[in-house]
Amino acid sequence: MQHHAGWQMTIEREKAVYHALNLFRADVSGMLRAEGWIVASSEAEARTLIARSHAAMDLAGASMLATVPLPWPSPPTFYDTNDFTRAFQEFVDTYGVPRYKEINPAPFTAVTFPFLFGMMYGDIGHGTCILLFGLYLFLSDSVNSKDEMTRGIYTARYMLTMMGASAIYVGAVYNDCFSLALALFDSTYRWQGAQDGLSGRVASGVSANMTASYGTASNVYPFGVDPAWHVSENELLFFNSMKMKTAVIFGVVQMTLGILLKGINALYFGEYAVFFLEFLPMLVFDCCLFVYMVILIFAKWAIDWNQRQLMGTCTHNMTYDGRPCTSTALLKDKCALKYGGDSGGCAPPMYPGQGSTQSVLLAIAFLCVPTLLFGKPMYSYFEKHNAHDGAAGNSGEHSVSEEFIHQCIETIEFVLGMVSNTASYLRLWALSLAHSELAQVFWKKIILAAVGANNGIFVFASYSIFAVVTIAVLLAMDLLECFLHALRLHWVEFQNKFYKADGIRFAPFKVAVSRS
């Protein structure tokens, strides 16, 4: 039995060799011929190995490696991965293998996947736990484990480390650490009635005032969210607004990137009809509606609405710009901006001519739909009509009708998909809200309740329960939930904009040795 492993390797190697030889076919002079694929960068190495084998067996010239004349069948797809990219490439290949020379989504996934996960799981404390687990995998020797699941987790060590780092960063932006806010810097708000405006109890409904003028450098919290928002009565309203808008921004950016990659693919493969009649209308449609929406979000964040409201007030029968007024006058008559609309600019619209600008953008986006629907089928019709005679015209018309039906499906899927995909990115906000609310409930109902009881045994038992619940729910179940939702955003919302995923994976000759 001491030579069992060596004999097993020899037998399996012989079986693999003879299985490959069975794929050859007989040629002249008792030779065997086969056609296959080889990675271009490995061709020189393969020739060297053949020559070395022939020299060792004194069979010079017994076989050769030559390039098969064109045309070739569709080549398989091969990507050279490393320890960092292997896990992300497996994610992409699970959805579908890229076409030969098609843009591979894996490098983009390696950047965006951990970050989108962090947006849903953003918490400094919980992210640190994931980061430490990822670093532990670097120090462990699990790659040779007999357990397939253990080897899979070890393969994802880079991914888990990046997921933890992203959760820490986004948690720092949210200012969340195990559901608690960290006062790392001085708050830009002071509470009326509190000691030095910072500490102590205040009555419910007491306002917090800014310490500096709006928009100045002193009024900006150095990093992340001001901890004052975590103890305010409108905390949930503020964080919902911030996270919802942030989710939409990153969603539109990622979808727009997917559309741009579709255009790059079309140019690379010389599909100019796809570039001009699909990519450009898609990009214009996206920019007129969704990119414009993102611009409005940033514009709304940049406006001092307190100043805008002041411009629409009537004080001592005088407007902000010195015109006489009455308290019963309409807001658009009192507003000093004169941007039009019902408010004149002191409420939306946010800039002059906003209504007419949006009408033009909406009209352009509407015109993109028939371009997407009829452009490519009509181009194919005229191209085939000019290239074929009347006898071949019926089959050409039949293929054009099929292409029109296909294009109709593609157009409906894109137009409706842009709306539904944008709404789908709101899961970044929803899961972040669920994570933070669960963490707060566990903290308040378990830890704070135990501290309030002023009993050491009860505190110890409550902390044990808190640790178990946190690990089971937040560090296991919620981690898996955010992981799957981030994966879905890449498969459906991002990759369907450009990724065909109908390629064939390159399968080289390999001797698979069973693990003993």
Image (cartoon, rainbow, N blue to C red):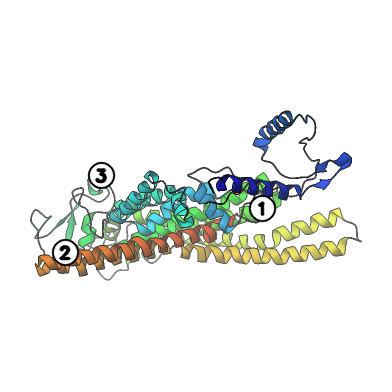
Q: Which residue is mark 2?
A: 460
Give the residue drawn at x 57%, y 58%. Answer: 95
In this view, the residue farthest toward the front is: 1
The span from disc 3 to disc 1 (Cα, nearest Å) is: 55 Å
Residue 392 falls left or right of residue 193? right
User: Badge 3 local density, few (<14 within 10 Å), some, or many (20+)?
Assistant: few
Question: Is there CB contact under 8 Å for labels 3 and 1?
Answer: no
Q: Which residue is mark 1?
A: 504
Q: Is residue 173 visible?
A: no
Which mark is first along the chain, 1 or 2?
2
Of labels 3 and 1, earlier in sequence is: 3
Q: Residue 387: x and y, percent?
A: 85, 53
Whether pointer 2 and pointer 3 mark residues with C-beta atoms closer than 8 Å, the reply is: no
Whole-percent x, y for residue 117 in the image: 41, 56
Q: Which residue does the image show at 50% across and 50% down from the upper left?
A: 87
What is the x, y in percent for residue 382? 80, 57
* Disc 2 residue type (three-letter): Phe
Q: Amino acid at mark 1?
A: Ile
Q: Which disc number belongs to residue 154? A: none
Q: Nearer the viewer, mark 2 or mark 1?
A: 2
Looking at the image, how many numbered discs can be counted on the residues?
A: 3
Please, what secondary structure does the residue beneath circle 1 have? loop
Image position of 153 (left or right of 441): right
Which callout, 2 or 3, points at the residue further toward the start of the chain?
A: 3
Amino acid type assigned to the residue bearing label 3 in the image: Ala
